[in-house]
Structure formats: C-alpha cells, structure tokens
Amino acid sequence: MAPLIEIRDLRVEARGDDGQPVEIVKGVSFTVERGEVMGLIGESGSGKTTIALALMGYARFGCRISGGTVRSGDTEVTGLSEAALRKLRGRRVAYIAQSAAASFNPSRTIMQQVIEAARIHGTLDEAAAREKAIGLFRAMAIPKAETIGERYPHQVSGGQLQRLMAAMALITDPEVVIFDEPTTALDVTTQIEVLKAFKSAIRDRNTTGIYVTHDLAVIAQIADSITVLRHGFVQETAKTGMLLASPAQEYTRNLLAAAEPARRERPALVETAAPLLKVTGLTVGYGGLDAEGMPLVPVVREVDLAIRQGEALGVIGESGCGKSTLARAISGLAPPARGTVELGGKVLGPGLAQRSREELREIQLVFQSADTALNPRVSIGEIIGRPLTFFFGLKGAERDRRVRELLDLTHLPASVLNRQPGDLSGGQKQRVNLARALAAKPRLLLCDEVTSALDTLVAAAILDLLAELRKELGLTTMFISHDLKTIRAICDQVLVLYAGRVVETLPASAISARGHHPYAKLLFSSVPALHQGWLDGLAAPAMPASATEAQGREGCTFFHRCELRMEGTCDRIVPPPRQTPEGLTVACHHPLEG
Amino acid sequence: MSASKAAASPPRRRVSPLRYVMPGIVLFWLAMTFIGHAVAPYSGAAIQDADLFEGMSRKFLLGTDYLGRDMLSRILEGARFTVGISLAATALAVGAGLLLALTASAVGGLVDQVLSRFLDALISIPSKMFGLVVVAAFGASIPVLIITMAIIYVPGCYRINRAAAVNIAALDFVAVARSRGESTFYIMLREILPNMVGTTLADFGLRFIYVVLLLSSLSFLGLGVQPPDADWGSLVRENMPGLPYGAPAVLMPALAIASLTIAVNLSIDAFYGSRRAREGVH
C-alpha cells in the first residue's frame, strides 16, 4: 500500500532582508504510512514548522512553496486551488498549534470554536457535533467534559486548552493531524497529561500525524519514525528506536547527547561557616499590603535559603511558582514585604534605592531572554563596557582591554564589539548577557532561565561555559530553571519551589533518591526520559493534577494536587521543614518513605 | 487564508514616484522659510499694479491680491511665518512632551499619575477656544502664538511618547540598568530614548501638520499673524473678497497650505514604509 503522506523534494522560499528569495526548506523528502506518527525534530530555523504547514498547502506570510510535491492520500496538495485548499484544511488535514491560548478566540465559548470546523465543512449538524465534541473531551481526559464547552478560553487551564484544541482538530476525523510543538509551553507535570491524551487519541483513531518539536524525549514517546532536520535539509530519517539506539549522523548524536546533559565538572566546595547568601523568611508579592503587612497577592512566601561560597544552587518549579520573583527580590528589583537578604553577613536593603553601589555590584542578575535584556540600539562593546565604567571608572584603552578579556572569557569573537544585539545569534546574545554580568565582578550571579530560550545544542554550550566560569572564577550562582535536566547538570543543591513556598531542599545527587515531597516526586517523575515507552510505563496519577484552586493563606500550598493529603491537617497548618535520613529537607506533614 | 495567495508570488516592493516628489515639496518650503524673501520676484509689501485680483499672467505668475500686490511673492514671504512659527511651536511641544513622557516612564508611580492626569485635563480643552482666549488676553504677537500652540500640543505629544516609553521601560535591559544603580537621567536618555526615536519623529511630523492647520485657522480668523506680516492663513482671509471673481489670490495660499501638509504626511509614510520593509517588521 502506498504511504498516506508523500513529500518529495519540497522547497520553500522566503523573502530575505535584501528582498531576494532565500530557500529555507531545501529539497526535503519523506513518507508517512497510514496510522503512523512522523516526528520532525530540529533547532529553530531548521524548517520543521514550515514543512508541516506545507502539508496544508500553506506558507507563512512572505514565503512560498517553490518546488516539489506534497501528496496526502490521493490529493496533490501543492497543485490545489485556494478553494480546494479550504476544503482540505480542517477537514482532512488538521493543525494543533503551539500556543492554544493564542489560538482560541477569547470572546467565544470553547464549544462554539471546537465544533466550528465540523459546521464549516458540513460534516455534522450542530447537535451531533456537540455530542461528538463531548466524546472527544472524555477521550482527552478533560474534567467536566459535559460542561466545559460552555466556558470561555480564559476559564480553563493551559493544559486543558491544549487538549481542547486537539479535540477541535479531531472533530472532523481528519486523515492527518499536524502537532506543532503542542506541549512546549506547558509545565512538565501538565505535559504528561497532554501527551497521554494525544497518544491515546492517535492510537484509538488510527490517526496519521506529523509531530513537530525540538524535544527528543517528547518525540520518542509519540513518534514511530523521526526525521532530523537542520538548516532546511534532512539529516536522517529512521524508526524511533533505531534513531535513538544508533544515530547515523554526527548531528543526531550531538542532539542525543545534549538531550541528556551530563553533570558538568564542578569545583570542590570550601566548607565555610557562614554562607555567602542567606535569605530568611522572604515574602514578596504585589497588590498592596493587608492589615498584617502581608501582600494581597503573595508570590514568594516565607522562603529561607542559603548559598555557600562557590556553590551553585538550583531553583526549580513550574511557571508562576515565584522563581523569578525570588531572584528579583534578592537583586533588589522587587522589594520584599517581609524577610531579609544577607550577603556575606551583611543585611542588604530591601530595594535598589536602599543599597549602595558596591552592594548592587556584588549581585548580578542575568535575565532569561537576551533579546529583551540587551538594548537593541547599543553596541556590544558599550553594553559590556558600561558596568566597567560605572563600577570601576574604567575608560579608554583600559576599558577596551577588559571588554576584550570578557569577550574572550565568554568565547565571543572580538568582531562583535561594534555590532548591535540584532546582528548576533541567540547563543551569542546570551554570552554577551553573561559577559555584562561578569564585568561587574559579582560575588553572586543569579541566572534566571538563561538556557530556556535556546536550542538544545546552544544551551548545552552555555552550560559548559557556566561550568567553566565557575571553575575559573569561583562564582557563587543561583540557577533558576524549570528544566530538571539542566539543574542537575550544573547545580550542587536544588531548591524545589511550589506556589511560592520551598517544599524541598536536596543535594543535586539525590534527585532520583527516595523520600521526596509529593510535589518533588511528581516533578521528578514527569521529566520525559529519552527512551521509547517511558510514557506508557508511567502509573496514572491518583489525583487529577489540574485542580488549580485558589491558594489559601493556611496550609500546604500543594494540598489540592497532593495524593497523600490529610484533610484537617494539610489544609490548616503550613508544614514545617524537616530533615529526612536521606539528607533532604522536606516540608510535608506526611512521614515520607518511597 | 489570503496570506497564501499573497505567498504564491513573492510581494514586490512598489517604488512610487511620490517617495521623491513629496520630500522634495517639503524641502522646497523649508528652503523658502529662509530664502523666500530673497527669491521672491517682487517685494510682497509693494503695490505693483492698479488692477486688483488679477488672473495668472507671465508678469504675475499667481496673479495679484486685493491691493494689487504680487501673490507669488506674498506666498513665498509668508512661508517664513507659516513654516517658521509652526516648526518652533512643534519643536517646543514635542521636546516638552518627550521630556515629560521619559520622566513619567522612568520614574513611574505617583509622578506618572500626576503628570498624566494633569495633561489629560489640558487635552480636554478645545484647541481653538484655548488659542482664542490666550490671544484675547495677551495679544497676537509671534512669541505668544508659538507658546500657545506648543502648550496646546504638549499633551498629545506626551500621550504618544509615554505610550512608547512605558513599553520600553518595562523591558529587561532597563531593569538591568536599574539594578546596576544607574540614574533616572541615564535610563531616560541612554536606555529608553534611542529605542523610541522613530515614534517621536513620526509624531513630530504629524504634530507639525496640526500646528500648521491651527495657525492657519487662527490667522484666518484674524487672531494669528497680524498685518503687515502675513502667513498663508492671513492671505486666504484678506483675499476672501476675490472669491466671486475666481481670483487665484484666494486659492493659491490655500493650495500652499495643502501642499505642505500633504507632503509632510506622505513623506513620513514613505519613510516608515521603506524602514519597515528594510527591517522586516510588519
């Protein structure tokens, strides 16, 4: 039997900066059998989404399909008229976008939007479409399947919205579904539920899929075959098991290595009595203060932490748990409502205005996105040079020499000196971002998700750089990330944050050991492993993890999602931190064993 | 789905002749502001002919006015008032608006609130009414006109520039500068300002047009530039009696106003159109 999808020598052109066409997909060919899922993997700019969109005969603004053929079933997609394409899209080929939140219309109910495709294509009448949608919601394990359709998109969680979007795609029983990074924006604990829902939906319906992602571990769970793309070329195509076990190309091997980052070499710690950074009872929030002097919307609550000289502390937690706010409070950007920050035994003022220039210099914050952290109108030389002038009064040749040293330290070519941030690649920008922070010779470096926006291989290089800097400069760092693998690769200690509270502190080496807080356990077990069948082997969580109720002031913040919760205790009393025999500090009422 | 239709043939960049003609007109009037007196064929103040409201002839290219003065010379000499006063008032308004906007966005909090509400109050006063009151109180000298029009347009400039500046002030690189302990002044001028130059320049052009039109209306009402000097608005007013005769003396100053405002407007569009295409911003 002929394969369902056949892409032959596909070429897509975009208009370049100078108005000349530039080929961004350069002769890609592959086939997908009916009922199989093909994974497209590659870094940003590799053309993976462009190829997936070409399956619908669609090219983004400024692009056009310039050559080759795309066949789906017995239809030549590339030869279709606009009207015929409209009949194809949403009916025979459906699309699930990365950000469901941006793809739903906020002013219409979910149900209206989910059944829209069925009504446009006339496959079902209104009542039948509604019934089918509810069936799909159930298949996707969406809670309250009967009534959720009456809500508006902002009233459901991100993970639910992503599954609702899948239901929207499946309502017309399409032959082909395109998944365009559908779980990239989700937290790992949510990602699992969504992946499970996708997988069972694909299996039950014998759907043929194209799954686009940059995450090898995710694609290993879903795809039957994987095509590795780079710069618009196919590197290799192989069955998933084959590709993971014996990659043919150097590039694929590098990707595989970067997906499971090795623990970087770390300097031996000097055991000093007093920690360099000591944070006590830190509470940060916004929205004014209540009668007790607590913020109305607390983001970080009563956090205690300590970092010793030369140590790297990892802070992990899902989006919105207060990781970044914690870093901003330590740096003075977000004055805390309560609590103190001590650096080297000296209590620092709460806000920037109350700190001396020297105190500001000693703590440097590196922001996640180098795109917004570097002024686009200022040259790299000036960006790195400014702290030198500002803190050390360096000028002229001396400043130039130091800037070049810093470029050298961060492995940047001297040729970037006179360029502006827009001319640099993502990895280079992040290096400039680091170099600027290092220019101040800080005692404490706060890294806020510095690798999260980068491609896997580029991120790996930045991790290497950070490990190297720690060794050479003896830097003390606080490393914030939502990615456990990154944290494990370069940190000594790990702090797990949930809804603003520290639920657990542990040595990085104990991440997979026993005796964890229920949330830490959930988090650790949610990180996809780089082998097939990991997802199928997972036990179903006892509690639905999507219940995000309003957090009360009292009790454990994880109460509503915890499978071990004890009514009457956990929702009343904030669990105090407790040492376990395994050397962890856990904030949980439950006597933890396994 | 129209995007894919557009995608079928890569969009060509249209080069319109307006891109060169319009800036040319603007430059011409700018030049006349300074050398209008020198290049005018006659003295604009001198009566040349006994015949009033003459039509266009080889001797008087744009005819004569209600006293028999050469219309071309009067328009060229009037450019000094219309363009000059408007430029000065616009520069003042944009400068003050920009400074206040940068302050509001860099300092934020109460300063931002107070400035915004005060200027909101000012913006709610009808501009011609405000002009009328001030001219009635202080008389219609050129400095009074400039300052009055600057005050009228400060709130609008402030609004536009503040909207651009607060977005930039919220970016991480400004937070980096703050956490380094940089002064508010440094943040305003070195971090925020360079990123909003485009917006400010576009606003300058638009604001200039508003000022030209307001000045012309005030002069038309007899509240603007006073005789013996005459800007284009005054020229339209004093030649109103020529309307029944179809005299070019009424039409030509009005056309001068139109040519200036339209040319400035289209030049801004062309400038930003090509910039957008170059930078790939949609």
Image (cartoon, coloured by chain):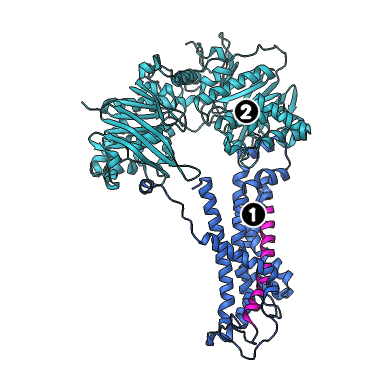
Chain colours: A cyan, B blue
Relative horizontal placement of residue B137, taking residue A144 as reference (left or right): right
* CB under 8 Å between discs 1 and 2: no
- The answer to whether one can see residue A280 in this image is no
Magenta: main secondary structure equals: helix
Relative horizontal placement of residue A54, taking residue B108 as reference (left or right): left
The image quadrant of residue A577 is top right
Q: Secondary structure at mark 1?
A: helix
Residue B84 among those drawn in magenta:
yes
Q: Residue at x 65, y 89 (%)?
A: B49
Q: Find residue A340 and name its label.
A: none
**A268 shown above or below A137:** above
Dot 1 surroundings within 10 Å: few (below 14), some, or many (20 or more)?
some
Magenta range is B70-99
**A272 shown above or below A144:** above
Q: Please, which residue is most extreme toward the bottom here? A: B50
Q: Position of residue A5 (x, y in %)?
A: 28, 31
Q: Please, which residue is most extreme toward the top here? A: A581
Q: Position of residue A66 (x, y in %)?
A: 36, 40
Residue A227 among those drawn in magenta:
no
Q: Secondary structure at mark 2?
A: loop
- Residues A556 and B279: in front is B279
Q: Which residue is mark 2?
A: A412
Q: Please, which residue is most extreme toward the front here? A: B58
Q: Residue at x 77, y 35 (%)?
A: A396
Measure how far apart labels 1 and 2 are at the Cα level: 44 Å
- Residues A469 and A339: in front is A469
- The answer to whether one can see residue A149 in this image is yes
Q: Which residue is mark 1?
A: B116
Three-letter code, disc 1: Ser
The chain identifier of the residue carrying mark 2 reads A
Dot 2 surroundings within 10 Å: few (below 14), some, or many (20 or more)?
some
**B187 shown above or below A564:** below
